[in-house]
Amino acid sequence: MQKNQILNSKLKNQIKNFDKKYFFSLFLKSYNFLRKFNKRKFKIKPVSKKYGFYISDYLITNNLLTELCEKYNSDKGGNKNPFFEAGNNYSDYYFKLFKENRLSYSKIFECGIGTNNINLESNMTSEGKPGASLKVWKDFFSNAKIYGADIDKKILFSEKRIHTYHVDQFDRGSIQEMWRQINDYDFDLIIDDGAHTFQANINLYENSFSKLKINGFYIIEDVRLSELKTFYKYFEKNQNLVEFISVNSNSTDGSSNLIVINKIF
């Protein structure tokens, strides 16, 4: 994470703590109320035929996945997340994508389980809740085994149906060693919510896509707008179904973008 991003995260945390200490979180509660009041209908519309790029309008819906994100304090959806301003609203899109088949999913993997070490790149700030999204997936995909991995060894944990492993996305050997330890395949869903750089994302993709079952989904989260063209060129000739999804949110860094790959070969 760049120095200015770390400073911004610290400032947001200071503001949040000040609001909580002296105003009983009145400002944050008012902010969240206005966001709920301003919600809009969910719809997906094409933005660019060339890029297969879609944008889903910002909203907060009372669906199970969003409720679970709020319960466990995951930044994937809802009002409650580790950041002062709203994070992403991926949960609305994910609920639409997975609700029909969620009980049939048996194996889920997510890279990046939410380190709160601000000295590590792509951290969740000191307010982060390590493992939050894994617990969301455990409840949502209630018949699935949940696997997670992170570069921060201190936050690794295991509980019923959840197992986590160490991985460095910038090191292909580390990724291969992680899969050797997991010793499983035919995953229904693989999510990359890790380092959030093109090279790290591609390292994981090229060493993990083979673990995905046919008709499974591989999703890269938080793709920066500045790197979308690079990703498009990389996936341009991919024979699987690749879509670029932009989820409108209050995110200020333009990174609320997904690459969704449906494996058909």
Image (cartoon, grey):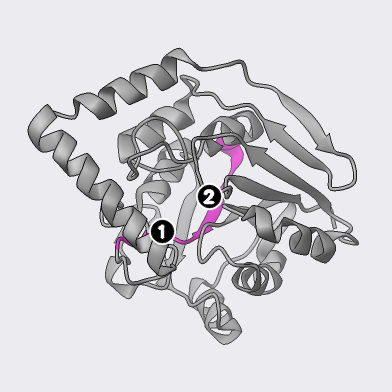
The numbered mark at residue 189 is none
Residue 228, picture quadrant: bottom right
Seen in the picture, residue 182 relative to 255 is either above or below; the reply is below
Q: Position of residue 85 (x, y in %)?
A: 38, 38
Seen in the picture, residue 53 relative to 261 is either above or below; the reply is above
The residue under label 1 is: 113
Q: Position of residue 169 (x, y in %)?
A: 54, 75
Identified by mark 1, the residue type is Ile
Helix, strand, or loop for circle 1? loop
Q: In this orientation, does residue 188 appear?
A: no
**How busy is the neighbourhood of tag 1: few (under 14 within 10 Å), some, or many (20 plus)?**
many
Identified by mark 2, the residue type is Asp
Q: Quadrant of the N terminus?
A: bottom left
Q: Residue at x 8, y 33 (%)?
A: 22
Judge left or right: residue 182 versus residue 23: right
Read off the magenta span.
Answer: 102-116
Q: Residue at x 12, y 28 (%)?
A: 23
Query: Looking at the image, which is closer to me, 100 or 170?
Result: 170
Q: Residue at x 32, y 45 (%)?
A: 82
Q: In this orientation, does residue 131 appear?
A: yes
Q: Position of residue 171 (x, y in %)?
A: 56, 83
Q: Residue at x 33, y 60 (%)?
A: 7
Query: Looking at the image, which is closer to me, 108 or 255?
Result: 255
Query: Looking at the image, which is closer to me, 70 or 13?
Result: 13
Q: Residue furthest bottom?
A: 173
**How busy is the neighbourhood of tag 2: few (under 14 within 10 Å), some, or many (20 plus)?**
few
The residue under label 2 is: 253
